[in-house]
Amino acid sequence: MNHEAMEELLAGYALRSLAGEDAVAADRLLVEHVPGCLDCRRTMEAFQLVSAELALDAQPVTPPETLLPRLHREMGAQARRRRPVYLVAVAASVAAVVGLGGFAVSQGYRANRVQGRFQAVTDAMNFARTPNASMTQVGAVSDISSPGVQKCYIYGSEVPMPASGFTYRLWVVQGSHATFEGDFVPEDGVVIVRLALDPTTYDALLVTEERAGSVPTTPGPTKWTSSPPVASAG
């Protein structure tokens, strides 16, 4: 069995849409092949994340009684001859029934990005629970840091997008000097950035909104700050 067929089975397994020979084949695949194949493990984790996002976003609605038999019938012999895009179509029909609104199932196949963001948020929340860690508000985002630890996270949800053609810029303020750390924009309202910074080495964090692609020499007008703005930092 090639990896294309394996991905089809793994997607069907994650969606709980397999029956008969397909279900048996998926179980065998999960026992005999997936544990030793890094690509398949990552694929399975990605499909499970997509499936979890569907479940969290859905409003409880009773599907038609004919839906499950139809899915099982369609996922039978013909499904084994179809490409993975067929599974996307099946998942989309399920999403429409349970009321996922405008959620596009195809977006879930940005799996690597979704998985990476999920892991980054998990790491940040775990770090926030470590001894001496604290969270400082910087406008719409928060600085999660711990004194003496060369690591911090900039995290926010429901963060508004910058104006069209603009980006957010993060600056570290030490006395009257501001150092540029990087640009960021929210993705689906979420910001999660990891930095190698010890909070004892800076006085404040500053976020500006500046034109994307411009040279970050000195901070522009302040968008958000963790303390009263420093005069020379805009």
Image (tube, grey):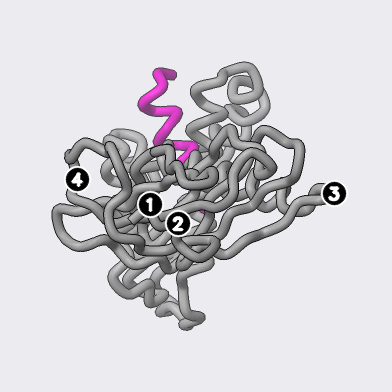
Q: Position of residue 141 (x, y in %)?
A: 49, 61
Give amino acid for label 2.
Val
Task: Give the magenta part as a residue range.
Answer: 1-15
Give amino acid for label 1.
Ala
Give amino acid for label 3.
Pro
Residue shown at 32%/71% (left/top)? 96
Q: Nearer the viewer, mark 4 or mark 1?
A: 1
Secondary element under disc 3, as helix, strand or loop, is loop
Identify the mark nearer the N-term, 4 or 3: 3
Task: Compute the Cα span from label 3 to label 2.
Answer: 30 Å
Q: Position of residue 73 (x, y in %)?
A: 38, 55
Decide whether residue 14 is among the magenta residues: yes
Foreground residue, 139 or 87?
Answer: 139
Image side of residue 19 versus residue 144, left or right: left
Foreground residue, 64 or 139?
Answer: 139
Q: Position of residue 60 (x, y in %)?
A: 51, 81
Secondary element under disc 2, as helix, strand or loop, is loop
Identify the mark nearer the N-term, 4 or 2: 4
Which residue in the protein does label 1 denote?
Answer: 233
Task: Compute the Cα span from label 4 to label 1.
Answer: 19 Å
Q: Which label number is shown at residue 230?
A: 2
For the question of whether residue 13 can be seen, the reply is no
Give amino acid for label 4.
Ala
For the question of whether residue 6 can be seen, the reply is yes
Residue shown at 41%/22% (left/top)? 3
User: In this rendering, is residue 161 above or below 42?
Assistant: below
